[in-house]
Amino acid sequence: MCEFDARSSHDAIAALIATAGQPTKSPFGKDDQIGMLNAMTPASQRLVAAEADFGRPFDMAVSYFPTMPSWTAAGDPSFQIWMGHTPNGNLVDDGSHQGRAVNELVSYSGDSFMMYTHTGTHIDTLNHYGYGGVLWNGFTEREHLGSRGWTVSGPELYPPIVARGVLVDVAATHGVDVLPDSYAIGADDLKDALRRQGSEIRRGDVVMVRTGRMSTWPDPERFMAPSPGINLDGARYLAEAGAMIVGADNLVLEHMPSEVEGNWVPVHTYLLVEAGVPIMEVVDTEELSHESVYEFAFIGAAMPLTGATAAPMRPVAYPLARR
């Protein structure tokens, strides 16, 4: 575990005190469960809102439908939706016990769905990965994981996000629609993209990395091929620069397969367990890229699924006025 002077927590960057391969003790206190989201303050929210053009919304979420690409390789369920009530079905079975005359007048429809929480546009919480059963800030599986979920670090604790967002358009910097399969985005790639855009990463930013993979959505074969994404070098650069959230337009954020022996998800474990940085995946950045919108007000909220390891989000970007 890493020690940190709590008196400096108001401007802390957890990645700067991390030790490789060890869960970090939060600089925001022993009870902290949201990590770098603590960088967001009422003042920072007001500042970004004051600079946003709310007349130009960019929806960064994907739609949910049964054949959508999703993480099913480890046996988790794909998105499924089914009707529980239909107008004609109610005439046949009268499940609400209203009688035929009422059911002919009231055309009632209802449905249900199920899915893996890491489906579609979503945010990973700090209980998603650990080292040896220990999470960010020292929370343990033995003490904090019940039969129905974690008692710590769930998305129900995440506040609505209003923050400065930065798109790092690596695909455009390389002059391609989509980066090659398994391309590893390192710090130099990110710096080159930021230099081309005239952008910078600041503490408390929501950073979205564009690989171009969303341009293949929703083709399952193309979208779910071995993914380009950030590697450990790239993740460290963003976290140490102060990113509050790191996301991407691909399924897994990081490039696959892993280049780190003994760890198949080194970027996930680094960001979540060491740096305290939540992750977003399957974020649609195509329209932002096409319009060359690189800095924006990021607004979104996680579905408050108590104790879950992820939750759907519908993030919206509003361009910031250039000064």
Image (cartoon, rainbow, N blue to C red):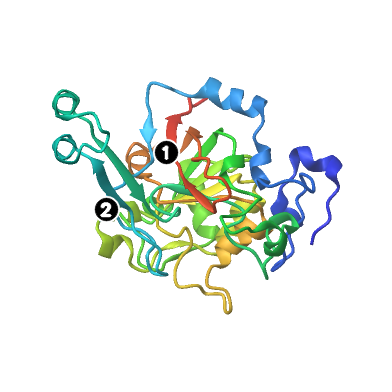
Q: Which residue is the site of mark 1?
A: 314
- Asked which secondary structure carries label 2, the reply is loop
In the displayed structure, does residue 123 sit left or right of residue 130? left
Residue 190 percent across, percent down from the top left: 51, 54
- State which tag comes first along the sequence, 1 or 2: 2
Discs 1/2, front:
2
Residue 105 percent across, percent down from the top left: 15, 23
Q: Residue furthest bottom?
A: 261
Q: Which residue is the site of mark 2?
A: 66
- Which residue appears at 62% of the width and 58% of the height? 146
Q: Which mark is residue 277?
A: none
- Which residue appears at 75% of the width and 39% of the height? 11
Look at label 2 and name its amino acid: Pro
- Front residue (pair 44, 81): 81
Rendered-image quadrant of the N terminus: bottom right
In the displayed structure, does residue 189 sit left or right of residue 25? left
On the question of residue 236 being in view, the answer is no
- Which residue appears at 65% of the width and 45% of the height? 34
Look at label 1 and name its amino acid: Arg
- Crowd band around label 2 with a 10 angstrom C-alpha radius: few (<14), some (14–19), many (20+): few
Residue 132 percent across, percent down from the top left: 68, 71
- Front residue (pair 37, 163): 37
Where 128 sits versus 321, above or below?
Answer: below
- Front residue (pair 88, 229): 88
Residue 14 percent across, percent down from the top left: 72, 51
Where 225 sits versus 146, above or below?
Answer: below
